[in-house]
Image: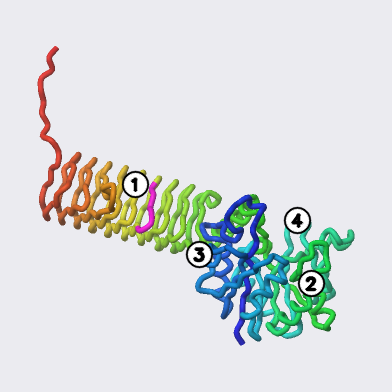
Amino acid sequence: MQSTAIIIAAGLGTRMKSAMPKAAHKIAGQPMLSHLIRAAEQVFDRIAVVVGPGMQVLEQLAAPHAVAVQAERLGTAHATLQAEAFFGEGPVAVFYADNPLVSVETMRALLARLAQGDAGLVLLGMTPPDAGKYGRLVMEGAYLSRIVEYADANEAERAIGFCNAGGMAALGTDMRDWLAQVGNNNSKGEFYLTDIVAIARTEGMNVAAINAPFDECMGVNSRAELAQAEAAFQTCARARFMAGGVTLLAPETVFFSADTEIGADTVIGQHVVFGPGVQVDGNVEIKAFSHLEGCVVRSGAIIGPYARLRPGAEIGEDVHIGNFVEVKAAKLGRGVKANHLTYLGDSEIGPGTNIGAGTITCNYDGKAKHRTKIGANAFIGSNTALVAPVSVGDGALVAAGSVINQNVPDNALALGRARQVNKPLKR
């Protein structure tokens, strides 16, 4: 039987003080909704996302997965019912987009507990360091007796540390039946998903709960909680990379994106930031205060300090990119050196070429971008401006201070500057 993940993402997020839907806010460079989808894709056969009306940005993020629209916000049970057409007969798990860090391992554990067969409903629980005002999970032996909201809990119940994290799983047939029985006889007149616990228990069904890590289950309803979730993600990512053989000289100062890939024996200095879309091979050194985004860095390369690799940068093996060098949409061959104060944009640079300090590829004419091609084993002197479109041949040498706006043949010396004139001073 197919398994299905339903992700509830219809919340407006008014506490965010934002015109953007709550689930579109980013953690580690990736929208909260995308975090859950990315994890669920590795566990479930089918995914359906429930959004509110007019949330096209979330519909786009959900693609190519199914989308259901909750036209009226009548509660979490009502939201889940909007995706009923996608339940099927197999396991159905419900997650909330504002609990974005639920891991693949936890999702699998939720389904595995359901598959044991002794409980027809399994909840996602957690033990936070401060239980605060979370709903408490009251257990009787191995099974859940009830959920008690903090406001309704007595002193003994408030002392319980095991809390409701929001997610749950059941077979599609049971989920469909229980949701149909949920009422809205409460102060807000809403249909709450947690009410199915009591319904399942009334029908004689056991209800179980798994204890997931709190860092995966924390809710995000405000900018402050978004920052807390970001911190939790970064702490986990740093530990994961170090466990995989990456050296972080000052771990608390390095920031990763959700899709960052780094190979073993790479050394990362202080205050390095990885934006989305970065792939770093093993045996790379990235020095302090560098920023990487949308780039590939091959083995043996040395980056920084104070380097910026922008989208489309392809840094070949043993390349040196030094301080205050910016690379964008450029492919640098093996052993290229650009060690100081340089901009290389929309370029292709052959292996073994040296780029002098202050070199600029002038790639934009005010209307369009143009490319610069530099061959292998060339030497570009300091303070050279290469006015694209232009090419410099293999083994060519461009004199310092030149403006190059014509192609340079292989093994040629190019001088694009005025002849020096010395005149005596009149005293």
Proximity of marks 3 and 1: CB atoms separated by less than 8 Å: no
Name the front one of labels 2 and 1: 2
Q: Is residue 307 left or right of residue 5?
A: left
**Which sits earlier in the primary sequence, circle 4 or circle 1?**
4
Task: Give the residue at x 58% y 64%.
Answer: 33
Crowding near the residue tagged with mark 2, few <14, some 14–19, many ≥20 C-alpha atoms within 10 Å: some
Disc 3 marks a residue whose amino acid type is Gly
Name the front one of labels 3 and 4: 4
Disc 4 marks a residue whose amino acid type is Asp
Name the front one of labels 3 and 2: 2
Disc 2 marks a residue whose amino acid type is Asp
Q: Which residue is mark 1?
A: 325
The colour scheme is rainbow
Task: Give the residue at x 80% y 82%.
Answer: 205
Q: Position of residue 170 (x, y in %)?
A: 70, 80
Q: Which stretch is magenta? A: 307-312
Residue sitting nearer the eye, 80 or 104: 80
Q: Is residue 100 above or below residue 175?
A: above
Mark sitting on residue 244: 3
Q: Is residue 82 left or right of residue 370?
A: right
Alpha carbons under labels 2 and 1: distance apart = 58 Å
Task: Give the residue at x 49% y 47%.
Answer: 271
Alpha carbons under labels 3 and 4: distance apart = 31 Å
Whether the magenta-drawn stretch holds residue 311 is answered as: yes
**Which sits earlier in the primary sequence, circle 3 or circle 2?**
2
Q: Which residue is mark 4?
A: 130
Q: Main secondary structure of the magenta part?
A: loop
Residue sitting nearer the eye, 68 or 274: 68
Alpha carbons under labels 2 and 4: distance apart = 25 Å
